[in-house]
Image (cartoon, rainbow, N blue to C red):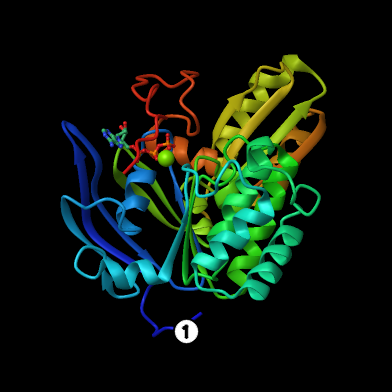
Amino acid sequence: MSTHSSGPAIETVGLVKTFGETRAVDGVDLTVPAGTVYGVLGPNGAGKTTTVKMLATLLRPDGGEARVFGHDVVHEADEVRGRVSLTGQYASVDEDLTGTENLILLARLLGHRKPTARTRAAQLLEAFGLTEAAGKQVKHYSGGMRRRIDIAASILNTPDLLFLDEPTTGLDPRSRNQVWDIVRAVVAQGTTVLLTTQYLDEADQLASRIAVIDRGRVIAEGTKGELKASVGAGSVHLRLRDADRRPEAERLLRELLVAEVQPEPDPVALTARLSAATSDSAAEQAARALGELTRAGITVDNFSLGQPSLDEVFMALTGREAGPATGRDAGTDTDTDAKDEVAA
Ligand SMILES: Nc1ncnc2c1ncn2[C@@H]1O[C@H](COP(=O)(O)OP(=O)(O)OP(=O)(O)O)[C@@H](O)[C@H]1O
Ligand SMILES: [Mg+2]
C-alpha cells in the first residue's frame, strides 16, 4: 500500500446524480479523512449506493466534483481505480467456484504468483472464519459466509480506500461482529474505509465521523459525539414504585431538568431527555432529579442513565425513524421499493 500525502481520502463538492425525475444524490459535500472509517448513514433510497458508485468510478456524476486521494473520479478514473476496492451488493465472486478457488483466481488476476496467491487466500479464509468452508462452492454459502468471502475478495490487495456498501445488512449478530472485526483489522493496516449502513449502532461501533444522508442530501455531519450532542446529553430512564405518582414525577422532572419527559407504555416507566445546554453533566442532572423525586416522596425502583442513540439523532434531524422503511411510524413513507439494486 502506498502511503499518501496528507490530503483527505475523499472530497466531494456538490455531487449530483439524477435518474429521470429522481435526484438520487442531490448536492453532496463530503470530506473523508484518510486512515479512518467514515460512516454514511441513511435509510433505504437515501442515495448511499449511488454516492459510492460515483466515488468508485462505476457511475458518472451529473454535477459537482469528487476527488479520491486528489484524483478526479471522472478525468482521472484510472488513478482512482488503482487505489480503491468495492464490496457492494453485487457479486464479485464466482458461484460455481469454491472459496479457495475464487480467492486464488482473483489474486492471480491481480498479478500475484501462484504460491503467494495460495498463501494469501488461505490467510484470508482463516482470518474470516471460512477455513472449513474453503472447499465448498460459494453458491452453498450462507448469507454471512457470502458477505465475508466478498469482503475477503476485495482486500486481496490491501486497497488504500475500501468501500463497504451495507456490509452487514441481513446478517445475524455473530456474523455482524465478525465483519466488524474484519473492518477494524483492515483499518488498522492503514486502509481508509467508507462504510454505508442503515444501522445506527454499526456506524456508532466503527466510524469516527458520520454523515447522515436522507433523500440525496447530507443532513448532518460530524463526529459521533457531535451528532449525539445535537440531540442532548442523554436520557434518564426511571421506573417508579407507584404508577399513580407518575404524572407528578413527570411534572417535577420537566421543571427540574428542562427536559422532554415521556411516559412509556409501561405505566410506571418514564424517560427524560437531558439537556446539553447546561454546564451540568448528565450524571449531575440525573442525580439532582433523583434527589428531588425522593424529597417529594416518590419512590424510584429502578434507574438508568443512557447515552443518546444515533436513532434519536436521526429522529431529531428528520422527524422520522431511521432504518429500513417498513412503514412503522414512518409518516409519509415513500421509500418502500427503493431496495432494488440497479447495476451500473
Ligand atoms: N439506476 C437507477 N435508475 C433509476 N433510479 C435509481 C437507480 N439507482 C438508484 N435509483 C434511485 O435513486 C435513489 C437512491 O438510491 P440508492 O440505491 O443510492 O439508495 P441507498 O441509500 O443505497 O438505498 P438502500 O439502503 O436501499 O441500498 C432511490 O430512489 C433509487 O430508487
Ligand atoms: Mg444501497
Ligand 1 shows up in the quarter that is top left
| Residue at mark 1 | 3
Q: Nearer the viewer, residue 303 or 99?
A: 99
Residue closest to the far front: 114
Residue 178: percent from left, percent from top: 71, 51
Q: Quadrant of residue 71?
A: bottom left
Q: Nearer the viewer, residue 50 or 310?
A: 50
Q: Residues within 10 Å of mark 1 (few under 14, many from 20)?
A: few
- In the image, residue 199 above or below residue 230: above
- In the image, residue 25 above or below residue 77: above
Residue 270: percent from left, percent from top: 67, 27
- In the image, residue 338 above or below residue 191: above
Q: Is residue 69 left or right of residue 164?
A: left
Q: Is residue 220 visible?
A: yes
- In the image, residue 84 above or below residue 45: below
Q: Residue at x 64, y 63 (%)?
A: 184
Q: Residue at x 51, y 79 (%)?
A: 1
Q: Nearer the viewer, residue 219 or 41?
A: 41
Q: Is residue 309 visible?
A: no
| Amino acid type at mark 1 | Thr
